[in-house]
Amino acid sequence: QVQLVESGGGLVQPGGSLRLSCAASRFTLDDYGIGWFRQAAGKEREGVACISRSGGIKYYANSVKGRFTISRDNAKNTVYLQMNSLKPEDTAVYYCAARVGVGTTLLAASYNYWGQGTQVTVSS
């Protein structure tokens, strides 16, 4: 069974940084494209960043472009989301997800497997 586990969330002040990790168990992560999504209280889930299997293609939501960076280390079977210059509006539960297929996308419906999420709170 495919399992994804997110970590690295927490409370940070505005302008601060966090690095989220998405680790895989029981399967090889480099067989999948990976996406990071978030869901704030009372809002719909939105795509934040995604990366193709090779890491050669990356997309970002306009709201995080220039502040967030997605990367993958296939040797460690882990995908990262580096979040800098955090804003209160970045507060949400962050999820990683895996999809089978070519390329990558921020469309949540294209993803086959999901982690349980990690809370990120940006507040002074």
Image (cartoon, grey):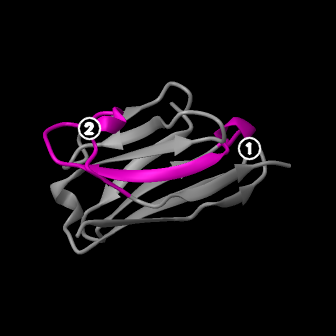
Look at 33% across and 56% down and name the residue there. 72
Q: Amino acid at mark 2?
A: Ser
Look at 25% across and 69% down and name the residue there. 75
- Report helix, strand or loop for mark 2: helix
| Magenta range | 85-114
Q: Residue furthest front?
A: 42
Task: State left or right for residue 101 relative to residue 23.
Answer: left
Tell me the quarter of the image containing the N terminus: bottom left
> CB atoms at circles 2 and 1 under 8 Å apart?
no
Instruction: Say which label, 2 or 1, has the lower sequence index.
Output: 1
Q: Is residue 102 magenta?
A: yes
Quadrant in the rendering for residue 24: bottom left
**Inter-mark Cα distance, 2 to 1:** 32 Å
Quadrant in the rendering for residue 86: top right
Residue 100 x %, y %: 17, 48
- Name above or below for residue 115 compared with residue 86: below
- Report helix, strand or loop for mark 1: loop
- Name above or below for residue 4 compared with residue 48: below
Disc ID at residue 110: 2
Q: Which residue is mark 1?
A: 15
In front of the other: 24 or 42: 42
In front of the other: 109 or 63: 109
Residue 99 x %, y %: 23, 47
Q: Residue furthest right?
A: 124
Task: State left or right for residue 110 relative to residue 84.
Answer: left
Look at 43% across and 56% down and name the residue there. 80
Quadrant in the rendering for residue 4: bottom left
Residue 96 x %, y %: 41, 53
Residue 69 x %, y %: 46, 44
Q: Is residue 107 magenta?
A: yes
